[in-house]
């Protein structure tokens, strides 16, 4: 039996394992919970109406979730604040702000104005105004990073960046599929579109998610004060890595199944279960570049990803707020104290989402480099 045959068989096994855990487990959970499967097999899987009754606001739930978020984040924040005296500044790249950065700023502002105004002659395209601000944002963030470090995704990895737009669309459509389980957000003023037009209308803004978060991650890492002290922090070294990986995969898959039984209480699994599944599957295939630095206590990349997603989340919610076509939230137990349309505790979901973006970008980078035939695992530091 040839090695190439074995490699193909192993690859096929992991492919079907991934499909089963990420897509099949939610369907199995819905079936076991007695929910109508036809509601999860619609194309495109975008939620535009609420049919699940949600649990009302609960002060105990609010304080418990808030306490858990603080329990996780405060040690990192204190570490960064207490390490400010030993910050080592990055050498200046010695570059001026590039002309294309000004172009990105102009596109972002023009898109913002178009999204928030109701100018009559913009009416035919008013439902398509969410993408331009993000195109401008991505260009602007890369321009600032280039000015500070002399590198950026636009200038040093343009093909990878373009492929990230395509991968991002698939990535976020998956979360629209998962949202059918919990219906935490749904869309309004989407108009009357046939499925094909509706798909392309939504795919354009979805394609900007990963490029925005990853570009912002690199920008954050160009400011040492934002991550100082995290290069040598808490170490994580599982005694039995293989067992830990398989347990993580099983836990993530079980979480996907259980969401349908208790959507009002397990909706946070939407942001944790895919991370456990994807990270475990990548680790089983030998791609551990995102988590390997934790063995030496280096949390810079993970912290930067979480912070980048939170920054992007603020702009997502802000630009969405006055847009004609927009999303609104219906989150059980904690739906109070809104910042734009999002309940304040809902922003905590962006933190694990940043890790999912990092895993997706790492997977794409692995595939991209493999196609080129010269894969080299990037370091945990800002690399292009």
Image (cartoon, rainbow, N blue to C red):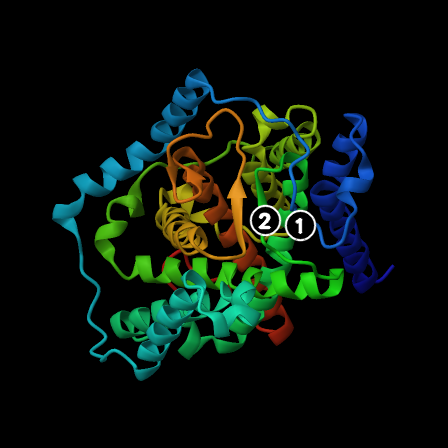
- Whether 192 is drawn above or below 143: the answer is above
Position of residue 241 in the picture relative to residue 90 (left or right): right
User: Quick one: which residue is furthest to the bottom in this view?
Assistant: 99
Residue 48 makes an appearance in the image: yes
Give the camera-side residue of 355 and 44.
Answer: 44
**Residue 164: in sight, yes or no?**
no
Tell me if mark 1 has few (under 14), some (14-19) or many (20+) residues whose alpha carbon lies within 10 angstroms of its own.
many
Q: Could you say which is closer to the camera, residue 252 or residue 166?
A: 166
Q: Which residue is mark 2?
A: 187
* Element class at badge 2: strand
Q: Nearer the viewer, residue 201 or 323?
A: 323
How crowded is the residue under tag 2: few (<14 C-alpha within 10 Å), some, or many (20+)?
A: some
Helix, strand or loop at label 1? It is loop
Apparent side of residue 212 relative to residue 307 in the rendered image (left or right): right
Name of the residue lying farthest toward the right? 1
Q: In the figure, is residue 1 to the left or right of 281? A: right
Give 169 or 90, whichever is nearer the viewer.
Answer: 169
Residue picked out by circle 1: 46
Q: Position of residue 23 (x, y in %)?
A: 73, 44
Residue occupying image coordinates x 79% and y 46%: 41
């Amino acid at each position: 039996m040839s090695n190439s045959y074995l490699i193909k068989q192993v690859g096929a096994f992991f492919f079907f394992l991934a499909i089963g855990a990420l897509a099949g487990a939610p369907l199995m959970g819905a079936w076991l919970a007695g929910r109508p499967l036809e509601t999860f097999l619609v194309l495109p899987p975008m939620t535009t109406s609420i049919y699940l009754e949600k649990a009302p606001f609960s002060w105990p739930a609010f304080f418990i979730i808030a306490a858990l978020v603080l329990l996780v984040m405060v040690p990192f924040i204190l570490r960064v604040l207490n390490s400010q005296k030993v910050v080592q500044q990055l050498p200046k790249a010695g570059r001026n702000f590039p002309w294309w950065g000004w172009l990105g700023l102009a596109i972002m502002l023009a898109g913002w104005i178009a999204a928030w105004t109701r100018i009559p002659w913009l009416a035919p395209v008013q439902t398509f105004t969410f993408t331009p601000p993000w195109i401008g944002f991505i260009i602007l963030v890369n321009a600032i990073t280039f000015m500070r470090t002399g590198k950026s995704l636009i200038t040093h990895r343009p093909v990878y960046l373009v492929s990230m737009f395509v991968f991002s669309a698939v990535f976020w459509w998956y979360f629209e599929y998962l949202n059918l389980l919990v219906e935490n957000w749904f869309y309004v003023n989407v108009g009357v579109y046939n499925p094909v037009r509706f798909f392309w209308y939504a795919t354009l803004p979805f394609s900007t998610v990963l490029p925005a978060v990853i570009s912002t991650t690199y920008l954050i890492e160009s400011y040492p004060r934002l991550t100082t002290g995290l290069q040598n922090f808490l170490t994580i070294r599982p005694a039995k890595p293989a067992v830990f990986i398989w347990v993580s995969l099983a836990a993530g898959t079980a979480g996907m199944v259980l969401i349908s039984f208790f959507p009002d209480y397990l909706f946070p699994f939407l942001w944790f279960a895919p991370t456990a599944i994807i990270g475990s599957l990548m680790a089983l295939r030998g791609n551990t570049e995102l988590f390997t630095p934790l063995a030496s206590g280096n949390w810079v990349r993970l912290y930067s990803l979480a912070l980048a997603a939170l920054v992007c989340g603020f702009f997502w919610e802000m630009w969405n707020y006055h847009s004609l076509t927009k999303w609104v939230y219906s989150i059980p137990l904690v739906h109070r104290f809104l910042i734009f349309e999002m309940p304040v505790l809902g922003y905590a979901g962006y933190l694990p989402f940043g890790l999912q973006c990092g895993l997706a970008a790492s997977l794409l980078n692995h595939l991209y480099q493999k196609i080129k035939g010269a894969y080299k695992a990037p370091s945990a530091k800002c690399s292009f």
